[in-house]
Image: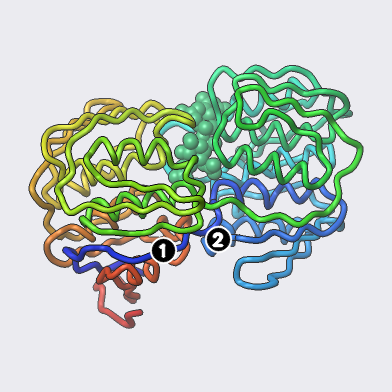
């Protein structure tokens, strides 16, 4: 078992480089199935969700070469299998993108229901609605396998009842080679949707409107290999921005697209934190305790739900009372129980939390309940007085490239420990 150990109280200063976006790369890796030829993809983050996607692709029969630590070459020409079993799909939520991509190429996919962070009910009814609209038959088989097949995929209009990142991506993947025009209405607008559209277009697809709520996809006969670089991770960048503010630090966050960070920057400014945007970097600094503010999570361009736990840590030590409303997920406050152990004063009522800012947090043994909850624990550990130990850090490793080294380079006293059993005897530190 691995733990993160943090001696809190150090101000973060310096520069940090943001890696490729997790939620873009986990869509783009399965999208390579649609191409005939080699795709060379750069700016791949070193995270366990990428390892899982590569494992699945490899098992399907793809050839994957690691060119350097952030570049992959993927050749899916010889894929024959259209089945993703439980042992693979349980590794992450994005395994369901293999439904759209296998369906798009082979008119058939059998994929076990996906795993992923536990954020409340995570239905896939909108994905199914989209597949059925373009001519597929969807059957839920025994063992929670989703079987999707079509004689021929035919473009049509698909209206989503809820704004869903996953359903938008899955229907884009399934329809790029369908006959005719597919129009996705009430589509998600997140930066990773635009990145996937750009990737598909680099392979010869005809996708227009990504980034707005209407996406038009004109089916093409064939897609070819391409070279592509993944966009920077909006949420990783936001996490370092909040960590800089929470530690009263001064950090230049490099390799970002400031436009993607506007909702986070705006809230930091509302809290009295200084934010300065450059072309591809953003500086965040303060030497004061933040002011309180209200937050409501929304689909892009609203405040991202994936920043809600991290920002709540900042508000937990802010001057005054704040209210946080979670409008995307039913159950994204599990981390609050961990923050209580550190002295935070937060009450949760349904999908809202009420935060009474305290002067400081104190260290405690805590765990990462999910990916962003884990990031919130790291920020809490960085500002708390004393030594914080975080367990279940595999959640954090799913989405944060080199988090220990990056925070350490900013002056944090943070390390990874490997412990052999429940007695938690320290074996190695590094
Ligand atoms: C993506 O999840 C992200 N994951 C999540 O990131 C993120 O929290 C979420 O989008 C919202 O931004 C990936 O991109 C791999 P949704 P996804 O479909 O696609 C409901 C992180 O920390 N819904 O946009 O699963 C659903 O219940 C993670 O990086 C339906 O009702 O989210 C939710 O309330 C965790 N029916 C809302 O829509 C459906 O068929 C948004 O879900 C699909 C979704």
- Label 1 or label 2, whichever comes before in sequence order: 1
Q: Residue furthest left?
A: 359
Q: Can you say which quadrant of the picture contains the N terminus? A: bottom left
Q: Secondary structure at mark 1?
A: strand
Q: In the rendered structure, are the residues bearing label 1 and label 2 in contact, judged by CB atoms less than 8 Å apart? A: no
Residue 88: % across, % down: 61, 54
- Camera sees residue 3: no
Image side of residue 281 versus residue 352, left or right: right
Residue found at x 78% / y 31%: 175
Residue found at x 63% / y 38%: 194
The residue tagged 1 is 16
Image side of residue 156 versus residue 347, left or right: right
Q: Secondary structure at mark 2?
A: loop
Crowding at dot 1, Cα within 10 Å, few <14 / some 14-19 / many 20+, comes out as some
Q: Nearer the viewer, mark 1 or mark 2?
A: 1
Residue found at x 55% / y 29%: 164
The residue tagged 2 is 45
Q: Which mark is residue 233?
A: none
Q: Residue furthest right?
A: 221
Say above or below: 25 vs 180.
below
Say above or below: 346 vs 35.
above
Crowding at dot 2, Cα within 10 Å, few <14 / some 14-19 / many 20+, comes out as many
- Camera sees residue 412: yes
Residue 317: % across, % down: 15, 46
Residue 237: % across, % down: 43, 52
């Amino acid at each position: 078992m691995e733990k993160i150990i943090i001696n809190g109280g150090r101000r973060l200063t310096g520069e940090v480089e943001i890696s490729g976006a997790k939620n873009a790369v986990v869509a783009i890796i399965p999208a390579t199935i649609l191409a005939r030829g080699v795709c060379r993809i750069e700016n791949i983050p070193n995270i366990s969700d990428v390892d899982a996607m590569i494992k699945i692709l490899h098992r399907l029969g793809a050839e994957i070469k690691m060119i350097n630590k952030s570049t992959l070459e993927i050749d899916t020409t010889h894929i024959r299998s259209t089945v993703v079993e439980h042992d693979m799909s349980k590794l992450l939520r994005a395994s369901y993108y293999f439904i759209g991509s296998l369906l798009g190429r082979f008119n058939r996919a059998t994929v076990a229901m996906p795993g992923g962070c536990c954020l409340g009910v995570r239905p896939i009814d909108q994905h199914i609605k989209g597949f059925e609209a373009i001519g597929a038959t969807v059957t839920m088989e025994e063992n929670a396998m989703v079987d999707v097949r079509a004689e021929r995929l035919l473009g049509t209009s698909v209206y989503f009842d809820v704004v869903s990142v996953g359903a938008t991506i899955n229907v884009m993947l399934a329809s790029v080679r369908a006959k005719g025009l597919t129009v996705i209405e009430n589509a998600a607008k997140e930066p990773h949707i635009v990145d996937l559209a750009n990737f598909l277009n680099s392979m010869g697809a005809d996708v227009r409107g990504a980034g707005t709520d209407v996406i038009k996809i004109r089916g093409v006969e064939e897609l070819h290999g391409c070279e592509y670089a993944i966009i920077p991770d909006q949420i990783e960048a936001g996490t370092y921005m909040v960590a800089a503010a929470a530690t009263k630090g001064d950090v230049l966050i490099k390799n970002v697209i400031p436009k993607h960070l506007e909702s986070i920057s705006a809230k930091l400014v509302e809290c009295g934190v200084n934010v300065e945007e450059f072309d591809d970097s953003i500086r965040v600094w303060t030497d004061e305790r933040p002011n309180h503010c209200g937050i409501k999570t929304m689909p892009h361009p609203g405040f991202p739900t994936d920043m809600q736990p991290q920002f709540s840590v900042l508000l937990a030590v802010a001057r005054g009372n704040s209210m946080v409303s979670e409008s995307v997920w039913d159950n994204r406050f599990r981390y609050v129980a961990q923050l209580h152990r550190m002295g935070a004063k937060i009450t949760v009522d349904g999908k809202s939390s009420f935060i009474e800012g305290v002067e400081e947090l104190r260290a405690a043994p805590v765990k990462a309940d999910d990916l962003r909850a884990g990031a919130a624990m790291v920020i809490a550990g960085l500002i708390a007085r004393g030594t914080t130990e975080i367990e279940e850090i595999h959640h954090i490793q799913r989405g944060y490239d080199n988090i220990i080294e990056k925070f350490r380079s900013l002056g944090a006293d943070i390390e990874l420990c490997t412990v052999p059993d429940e007695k938690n005897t320290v074996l190695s530190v590094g």
